[in-house]
Image: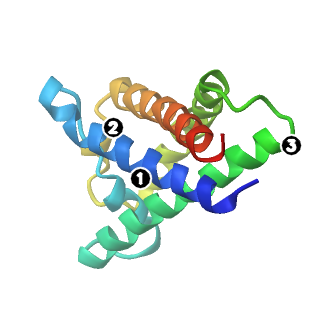
Amino acid sequence: MDIGAAMMSGVVGVAATTIIHNMLPIIGLPRVNIAGVLGTWVLDPGGRAAVLGITMHFAFGAGFGVLYAWLWHQGIGTLDYQWGVMFGAVHGLIAAAIIPVLLHRYPRPKEMLEGPVTLVALFVLHVLFGLIVSLQYRALVG
């Protein structure tokens, strides 16, 4: 297992899905302030919370890249896009369950969850993350 390639794949996945996530309002979907939610989980709302939140988001992405690679190297699934999508779907279901819990510290929780469409969008973004991680990791390690 190449930990550096796995971490890089996770960071690429987070970067790509963050760009897509920030474009959701263009098509009428709500934008969830990921940096704010994660940052206020640890700090009071403010500039430092946002910086910490985006740092946490990218660190989690790198960590999930390593987790996915570890699973593949343990023989759980194969390093292909189908298993990347499957890992992303499981990841997305877990995130959809955890995010509402994290919102208890966020100062404006109602803006974050505009009905089930927000959780569906976040689920789809995690599926895309899994797809991107699998493709990137495979490209790096062959």
Q: Is residue 19 left or right of residue 69?
A: left
Report how many numbered discs are placed on residues in the image. 3
Q: Residues within 10 Å of mark 2 (few under 14, many from 20)?
A: some
- Up/down of 138 relative to 48, above or below: above
- Which residue lies at the image location 24% right of the left edge and 75% below the top edge? 47
Q: Residues within 10 Å of mark 1 (few under 14, many from 20)?
A: some
Residue beneath disc 1:
103
N-term mark: 3 or 1: 3
Residue at disc 3, secondary structure: loop
Pointer 3 and pointer 1: residues touching (CB < 8 Å)? no
Residue beneath disc 2:
113
- Up/down of 96 relative to 6, above or below: above
Measured as percent of width and height from the top left, residue 131 is found at 53, 31
Going by the numbered disc 3, the residue's amino acid type is Gln
N-term mark: 2 or 3: 3
Going by the numbered disc 1, the residue's amino acid type is Leu
Residue beneath disc 3:
74
Out of 111 and 8, give the one closest to the viewer. 8
Separation of residues labelled 3 and 1 (CA atoms): 34 Å
Measured as percent of width and height from the top left, residue 52 is found at 39, 72
Going by the numbered disc 2, the residue's amino acid type is Leu
N-term mark: 1 or 2: 1
Pointer 1 and pointer 2: residues touching (CB < 8 Å)? yes
- Which residue lies at the image location 41% right of the left edge and 68% below the top edge? 55
- Which residue lies at the image location 65% right of the left edge and 27% below the top edge? 80
- Up/down of 130 relative to 85, above or below: below
Q: Is residue 60 left or right of residue 36?
A: right
Position of the C terminus by quadrant: top right
- Which residue lies at the image location 70% right of the left edge and 50% below the top edge? 67
